[in-house]
Image: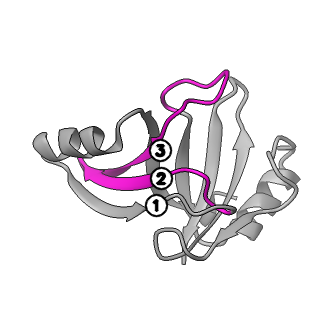
Amino acid sequence: MKQHYQGLGHIAVYTADMDASIAFYEKIGGRLHLWAPACPPEQQRELALVEFGGFLVELIAAPVPEGEGCIPHFAVYVDDVDQAAAALKAAGVDTFRTPEKCVMPNTFGGLENWFFTGPSGEQIELLKML
């Protein structure tokens, strides 16, 4: 299973003010990498990726969903979302949030992802950029 992992994808943070959050990260040495407006039905919220400190911060427009904190998930890059998920399922992980991966061809140049829940309620995203 670990052969599919390629590194930290991003850490997601909810924000009440997208412009202020981008400006904050730019002020402290970050740089706007990609921005994606909300585009229903596949993407319900405005998103931005900011390069900061050697990794990406994904800013997600508020409001924060009930029961979630300001850091809703972290993402791990994988070489193949389906194969990584199959390996996790074979290892006994049965906490995937949806029955299949999500394909978002218009978000950040295209991506595939699939979320599952860790033992403390943390959301982990398997992520492949297309």
The residue lying at 68 percent from left, 23 percent from top is 120
Q: Could you tell me residue 75's position as x and y percent?
A: 54, 50
The span shown in magenta is 42-71
Please name the amino acid that badge 1 sits on: Pro
The dot on residue 37 is 1
Mark 3 touches mark 2? (CB < 8 Å): yes
Disc 2 packing (10 Å; few <14; some 14–19; many ≥20): some
Looking at the image, which is closer to me, 44 or 28? 44
The dot on residue 46 is 2
In this view, the mark in front (3 or 2): 2
Q: Could you tell me residue 79's position as x and y percent?
A: 59, 71
Looking at the image, which is closer to me, 97 or 83? 97
From mark 2 to mark 1, how far is it between C-alphas? 5 Å
The residue lying at 13 percent from left, 39 percent from top is 28
Q: Indicate which disc, 3 or 2, sits on the residue closer to the N terminus.
A: 2
Mark 2 touches mark 1? (CB < 8 Å): yes
Q: Indicate which disc, 2 or 1, sits on the residue closer to the N terminus.
A: 1
Residue of label 3? 60
From mark 3 to mark 2, how far is it between C-alphas? 6 Å
